[in-house]
Image (spheres, grey):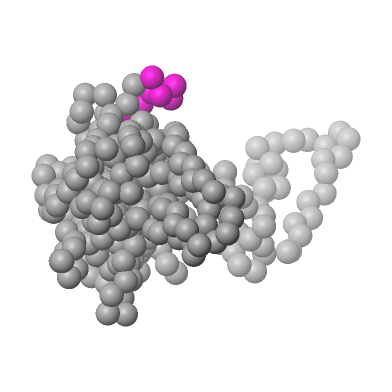
Amino acid sequence: MSRIIQPPVNDGQAVTATDLNTRFTAFSQSNAINAFNTRDAAFDLPQFSNARFMAPRMATAVIGYNDWKHTAYNSDTAVAGVQAPFLVRNSAGVYTPLAFGPTGWALAAGEVMRVYWDLSVRPRYTGTPWLTAGALGFYDIGSGGHTTVATGASCWCYWLQWDITSNALANWVDVPQQSDFNNTVGNLHGTSLDFCMASTVVPPWIDTASGLQNGSFASTNDYPVGWTGISGDWHYAPAAPVTVYGLRVVFTGVLHSYHTGGTNYLVRDDVVSGTGNCFIDHNGGSLEAMTMRMQ
């Protein structure tokens, strides 16, 4: 980097406004800082706190029932059949979106929207619903005898929806590459894993077998999952301009893995959900989004 040399004021030298202005003339340049005399490391994020050059738009919202002690929460019971998703709701039972204001966020080609969320949840159950006849999670193991346990592949699923129609937030749909698990899959309903790109799953229970003796297991044990933190993320780069007015987190269950015709699916386990013995509680969390340029 070039160096500006300016001799100091000497003893007895008169100091005038003209003299001082002349001394600092060398520092007044129209293109003083450029790629040739300044390295990237000379600047840190605080120097750009108002420029928002990395993320032009950022927003965050509290979602769910905001009680960190878990003394109060919302609860939902699994039901069988094609259905609308459950909504993450506040203490008044109203869904909690992340809204982007009157004009929304206009995304253009070359931009990416990054979305992150977290939530506190507690899956619950009574009895052993996975042992109900016809349940997809029913697994019979052993050779000398028989032991029935859960497969460990059942889950509740959370995912993202958005509104790209207006700031009224009255037209929610699943984000691209995400489904609501209501598509027909043989005699079941679900979706292929290709359309679970905004999904996060949580197990509804933990079931184990132990003490292998003479080809069978001596005992099985099931454990509640308890309160646990879950999180998800989703990145979207539009191929054509789109305006996003809001995002929200929704969920459904109980689902189970399924494979047919060379494709992997998550499908509704209607037998398990239809028992009325599967529940999930949700408390507070957050939902954040930002936009960035890809280059």
Q: Is residue 177 visible?
A: no
Q: Is residue 207 visible?
A: yes
Q: Is residue 218 above or below residue 32?
A: above
Give whichever of 155, 22 is nearer the camera.
Answer: 155
Left or right of 92: which side holds 130? Answer: right
Q: Is residue 68 magenta?
A: yes
Residue at the spot x=52%, y=57% of the render?
216
In the rendered image, residue 9, in percent from the top left (x then y), is placed at 82, 40
In the rendered image, residue 159, in percent from the top left (x then y), is placed at 30, 52
In the rendered image, residue 211, in percent from the top left (x then y), is placed at 59, 50
Residue at the spot x=44%, y=37% of the render?
224
Residue at the spot x=83%, y=37% of the render?
13
Residue at the spot x=78%, y=51% of the render?
6
Give whichever of 100, 133 is nearer the camera.
Answer: 133
Left or right of 139: which side holds 46? Answer: right
Instruction: Please provide the residue range marked out in magenta.
Output: 63-71
Q: Which quadrant of the figure has residue 281?
A: top left
